[in-house]
C-alpha cells in the first residue's frame, strides 16, 4: 500500500493559515486537510481549499470532513469541479453527515430525522453533475431539470465519506470511494474496513484498498480539558492512549498498527499551542514523513 501522511488544520486563523500552507508546500509535504468548524476562527474548508490550491503547485488539499446535508449539492458540485479544473488531481473531498460541534448544526438544516436520506440523495446528485453534461433529477429533496455545471473534471473525483456508525459504514460501501475514519482504534478500523467491503460487494461495487484513511490527533503533553471532554463524549469506554498517541514514538507505533489493519492514508492533527507549529513541523518531517512509501 502507498502510505501517505498529511496534516490537518483545526481552528487556524487566516494569517496562520497562509504561513502553514507556504511551509508545507516548501517542504514538499503530501497534503493538508481542513475541518468544518463554523463557530471557531478556522477558515471555511471549501474557501480554504481554493485558496491553498491557488497558492501552491503540488500540495494536495482535502476536507476532513465537509458537511453535505444542508449544503446545496449543485453549488458544491460546481465548486469541486472548478477547483479540480484549476488544480488537477489535488482536490480531495471528504463528506460527512453533520458538524461535530452542536452549535454549528443549525447552519445545516434538514428535515427532522432525514439527515441520512438527504445525504444519500445529495451525494447522488453531486456525482451525476460531476460527470454528466446535463442532469435531470427528480428526488424527494432536490429537483433539477436539464442542469449542467459547465467544465467537469476529466477524471471523476474520488469522494470519500466519514463516519463510523454501522449505517455510515454501509453507506460508504454503497456510495463512497473511500473512508476517512476518526476516533477508532486499529481493531475497530479493521472491522470497519471489512463492513465497508461487505456493503460494497452487496451493492456490486468495490472500494479501492488504498482508499482507507484515518484522522489522528497527536499530543505532546496533557490533553486539554476540552479535548478530554470531547473524547469522553464520543468514546466514554475507550483508553485515550489508544486514540490519541503521546509523542512521536507512540504516533509511529500506532500508525504501524493501523497500517496492519488496512489503513494507508493519515491526517495528523497536532495538539499544540499557537507557538508550537515550527517545532511540530520539524518533528513531522523527521519522524512521520519517512513512514510514507
Image: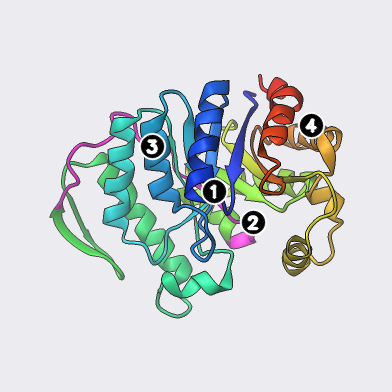
N-terminal-most mark, 3 or 4: 3
Mark 1 Cα within 10 Å, few/some/many (few <14, many 20+)? Answer: many
In what element is the residue under mark 3?
loop
The Cα–Cα distance between marks 2 and 3, rounded to whole angstroms, is 22 Å
- Foreground residue among 253 and 23: 23
Which residue in the structure is indicated by mark 3?
157
Q: Which residue is at the front of the view, 161 or 63?
A: 63
Residue beneath the point at 72% across and 65% down: 230
- The boundaries of the magenta stretch are 147-167
Residue 164 shows which numbered tag? 2
**Marks 2 and 3 in Cβ contact (< 8 Å):** no
Distance CA(mark 1)–CA(mark 2): 14 Å
- Mark nearer the N terminus (1 vs 2): 1
Q: Nearer the viewer, residue 139 or 258?
A: 258
Res. 71 image quadrant: bottom left
Badge 1 or badge 4: first in the primary sequence: 1
Q: Which of marks 4 and 2 is nearer the N terminus?
A: 2
Label 3, label 1: how many angstroms apart (C-alpha)? Answer: 16 Å
Q: Looking at the image, is mark 3 or mark 1 nearer the viewer?
A: 1
Q: Residue 77 carries which label?
A: none
Q: Where is residue 284 in the image (x, y as percent from the top left)?
A: 71, 30
- Is the C-beta separation of discs 1 and 4 under 8 Å? no
Q: Residue 170 sits in which quadrant?
A: bottom right
In the image: residue 284, left or right of residue 34 = right
Viewer-closest of 173 and 204: 173
Neighbor class of circle 2 (other Cα within 10 Å; few <14, some 14-19, many 20+) is some
Q: Which of marks 2 and 3 is nearer the N terminus?
A: 3
Q: Which of marks 1 and 2 is in front?
A: 1
Which residue position is annotated with label 1? 64
Residue under pointer 4: 256
Amino acid at each position: 500500500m502507498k502510505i501517505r501522511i498529511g496534516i490537518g488544520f483545526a481552528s487556524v486563523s487566516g494569517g496562520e493559515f497562509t504561513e502553514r500552507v507556504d511551509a508545507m508546500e516548501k517542504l514538499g509535504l503530501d497534503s493538508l486537510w481542513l475541518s468544518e468548524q463554523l463557530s471557531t476562527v478556522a477558515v471555511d474548508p471549501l474557501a480554504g481549499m481554493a485558496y491553498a490550491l491557488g497558492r501552491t503547485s503540488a500540495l494536495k488539499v482535502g476536507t476532513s470532513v465537509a458537511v453535505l446535508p444542508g449544503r446545496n449539492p449543485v453549488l458544491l458540485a460546481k465548486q469541486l469541479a472548478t477547483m479540480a479544473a484549476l488544480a488537477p488531481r489535488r482536490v480531495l473531498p471528504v463528506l460527512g453527515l453533520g458538524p461535530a460541534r452542536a452549535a454549528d448544526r443549525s447552519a445545516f438544516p434538514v428535515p427532522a430525522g432525514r439527515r441520512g436520506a438527504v445525504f444519500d440523495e445529495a451525494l447522488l446528485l453531486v456525482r451525476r453533475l460531476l460527470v454528466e453534461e446535463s442532469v435531470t433529477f427528480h428526488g424527494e429533496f432536490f429537483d433539477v431539470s436539464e442542469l449542467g455545471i459547465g467544465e467537469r473534471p476529466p477524471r471523476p473525483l474520488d469522494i470519500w465519506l466519514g463516519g463510523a456508525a454501522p449505517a455510515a459504514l454501509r453507506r460508504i460501501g454503497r456510495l463512497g470511494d473511500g473512508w476517512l475514519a476518526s476516533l477508532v482504534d486499529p481493531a475497530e478500523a479493521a472491522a470497519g474496513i471489512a463492513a465497508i467491503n461487505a456493503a460494497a460487494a452487496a451493492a456490486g461495487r468495490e472500494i479501492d484498498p488504498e482508499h482507507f484513511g484515518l484522522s489522528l490527533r497527536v499530543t505532546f503533553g496533557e490533553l486539554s480539558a476540552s479535548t478530554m471532554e470531547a473524547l469522553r463524549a464520543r468514546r466514554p469506554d475507550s483508553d485515550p492512549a489508544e486514540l490519541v498517541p503521546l509523542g512521536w514514538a507512540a504516533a509511529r507505533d500506532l500508525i504501524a498498527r493501523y497500517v496492519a489493519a488496512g489503513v494507508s492514508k493519515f491526517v495528523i492533527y497536532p495538539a499544540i499551542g499557537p507557538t508550537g507549529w515550527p517545532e511540530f513541523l520539524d518533528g513531522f518531517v523527521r519522524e512521520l514523513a519517512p513512514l510514507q512509501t
